[in-house]
Amino acid sequence: MQPTAVSPTPTGAPRESAGPGNAADASRQDQEAILSARGVTVGFGQTIVLKDLDLDVYAREILGFVGGSGTGKSVLMRTILGLTPRRAGRIEVFGKDLDAVDSEERQSIERRWGVLFQQGALFSSLTVRQNVQVPMREHMNMSQRLMDELALLKIEMVGLPVSAADKFPSELSGGMIKRASLARALALDPDLVFLDEPTSGLDPIGAAAFDDLVRKLRDTLGLTVYMVTHDLDSLHSICDRVAVLGEKKVLRAGTVEELMHFDNAWVQSYFNGERALRRV
Ligand SMILES: Nc1ncnc2c1ncn2[C@@H]1O[C@H](COP(=O)(O)OP(=O)(O)OP(=O)(O)O)[C@@H](O)[C@H]1O
Ligand SMILES: [Mg+2]
């Protein structure tokens, strides 16, 4: 089997104020933070990737997470999920301090989050239906019949034809693999989904369709979406807020409009640079 995603995951609870302060954060301070990270520091050997990072994710928002390649976006996601250890800091998900929960609470938190990883999204030796059932087997005690029905429901929910259910990942297009991975992330009806570059490698029409799907799922299921992306179209079209990772921390979180006025060289070249202007 290929290394791949296990079922996912995380958080949330009301907290004092949000991390990086700005107008958007200030206006949301009374909202429920479903995920809060404070003072998170992560490193590998001598290299520190994240230092004293603060971040809040609010219930039912679509948060875009951007930053240059190699700045630590995937590392942060894996740290929140508990797959990469942190050297310092506190992470709360669904109001629970992840360091303070026992294994039963941890399991119940993991049942409430879903993950679409950047790499190796599906087990290559399992069909789409079987992939979607992986989290069900891991976390629930369901009959095969019920798992089959639920898996089909998720497969249809993400816009895949029923005929895709019995296909292996090698028989799917890139866009279909993304959708199948999303179906697996949704397997346990999560409250929060983590998507790591879900539209990378898709053509613009496929990426726009995926964005529409994510927005529809948020609107209909009340999902909170944490989406790492490089896709400017996604940021503009579906993200309520965008967090920018740089200098080992979240430099700013706010609406795209606010970020366009944020005086930072990387942010300016990203949101107002040549590529952004071509997009307009
Ligand atoms: N397991 C690991 N061991 C050592 N270094 C690692 C490990 N995982 C990630 N890194 C390093 O941490 C840094 C951040 O990596 P990460 O994958 O989070 O980048 P990213 O922001 O997601 O980039 P991209 O946009 O290209 O996906 C990189 O320098 C990477 O080499
Ligand atoms: Mg990454």
Image (cartoon, helix red, strand yellow):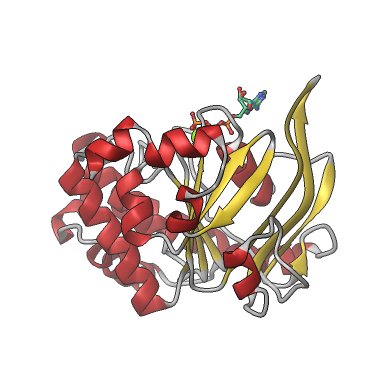
Q: Is residue 133 above or below residue 76?
A: below
Q: Residue at x 60, y 46 (%)?
A: 77
Q: Residue at x 34, y 54 (%)?
A: 236
Q: Could you tell me residue 107's position as x and y percent?
A: 67, 64
Q: Is residue 102 above or below residue 280?
A: below
Quadrant hosting residue 76? top right
Quarter occupied by the N terminus = top left
Residue 130 shows in this picture = no
Quadrant hosting residue 32? bottom right
Residue situated furthest top in the rendering: 46
Q: Residue at x 28, y 38 (%)?
A: 277
Q: Residue at x 77, y 46 (%)?
A: 40
Quadrant hosting residue 27? bottom right
Q: Could you tell me residue 17's position as x and y percent?
A: 74, 69
Q: Could you tell me residue 162's position as x and y percent?
A: 17, 61
Residue 235 shows in this picture = yes
Left/right of residue 263 with respect to residue 255 in the rendered view: right
**Of 168 and 215, the residue lying toward us:** 215
**Of 14 and 165, the residue lying toward us:** 14
Q: Could you tell me residue 50's position as x and y percent?
A: 72, 36
